[in-house]
Amino acid sequence: MTPPGPLDHRTRIKICGLTREEDLDAAVDAGADAVGFVLWAKSPRCVSARRAGELSRRLPPFVTPVLLFVNASDEEVRTGCDAVPAALLQFHGDETPQRCLELARGRPYMRAARVPLDSSVPFDLLEFVDLHSQARAVLVDAHVDGYGGSGKTFEWSRLPTNVDCHLVLSGGLTPANVTDGIVQVRPRCKTLAVDVSSGVEAVSAEGAALKGIKDAAKIHRFVAAVRAADVLLARSTHALLSST
């Protein structure tokens, strides 16, 4: 297994669980690289394939739409891809490597790995990456009921230091903790992106989470925190190289 490369790239950002035009526009304005649409009926952030298509048509060039599926049927994936032809696919359920290939039908996809919240429960990310070697990236998320979106964070220190693939860090990220997450995880893999949903959502006057409704100010703070992590790591790398 080859070691991770130098820390010289910009951390890519995906804002997931979008349901409204104004939230998509806020994500684009803040500088997101990708936006996610949940096509799983049991999610409170679910949108129809048609709605995902409507929203994705607002995207400017070079912002990637991502369609999230959980144990979907062939027809569900086909309908989503017809509605959003340029989409990257995200398989977030219990799909086997072979099932991912069958559903993707030659399209690029990433596979979600669900990391147990209980650190005593074994989880082998290197084995998972090897099994899903055809995936464009592996997204690491907390293993919770409902396949993500709970705002739970797993222990980042559980991830191996020599992951030979592109990782996407997800699960409980917020503007307050994403800098630390990037600093901890980015040296462990080829490249790192981050994926946020609940961490940039609005709350009601009573303090309840409004699932699927984003807060533009939180999105901008999240992106700023990611860029702060990039600067911090670049300075650390430069200092390390200068001392050798």
Image: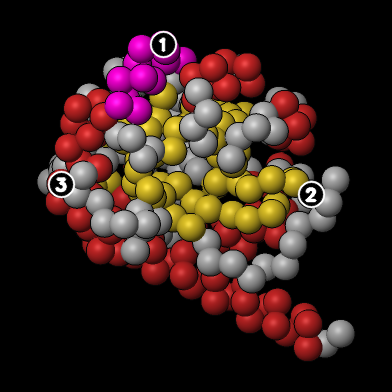
Q: Are marks 2 and 3 in contact (CB under 8 Å)?
A: no
Crowding around mark 3 (Cα neighbors within 10 Å: few <14, some 14 to 19, many 20+) is: few
How many angstroms separate mark 1 from mark 2 (CA)?
A: 34 Å
Q: In this view, does 84 lie above or below 14?
A: above
Q: Check disc 3 and report its element: helix, strand or loop.
A: helix
Image-based side of 187 in relation to 149, left or right: right
Instruction: Say which amino acid is labelled 3.
Output: Glu
Where is residue 202? Give x, y as percent: 22, 47
Q: Which of marks 3 and 1 is nearer the N terminus?
A: 3
Q: Name the residue under label 2.
A: 162
Residue at image location 78% in from the left, 88% down from the top: 242
Q: Can residue 218 be seen? A: no
Relative to residue 143, is residue 69 drawn left or right?
Answer: left
Q: Is residue 75 part of the magenta span, yes or no? A: yes
| Label 1 Cα neighbours within 10 Å, binned few <14 / some 14-19 / many ≥20 | few
The region drawn magenta spans 71-82
Residue drawn at 49 percent across, 51 percent down: 194
The N terminus: image quadrant: top right
Farthest residue toward the front?
106
Please tell me which residue lies in front, 177 or 234. 234
The answer for how far apart the CA atoms under marks 3 and 1 are is 27 Å
Q: For mark 3, what is the residue?
A: 21
- Residues tagged 3 and 1 counted as in contact (Cβ below 8 A): no
Judging depth in this view, the residue of 186 and 83 nearest the camera is: 83
Residue 12 highlighted magenta (yes or no): no
| Sequence-wise first label, 1 or 2 | 1
Residue 54 appears in the picture as rendered: yes
Q: In whole angstroms, how far apart are the C-alphas of marks 2 and 3?
A: 39 Å
Q: Is mark 1 on a helix, strand or loop?
A: loop
**Horizontal and vertical percent for residue 25?**
20, 55
The residue that label 1 is drawn on is 73
Q: Position of residue 231 (x, y in %)?
A: 54, 76
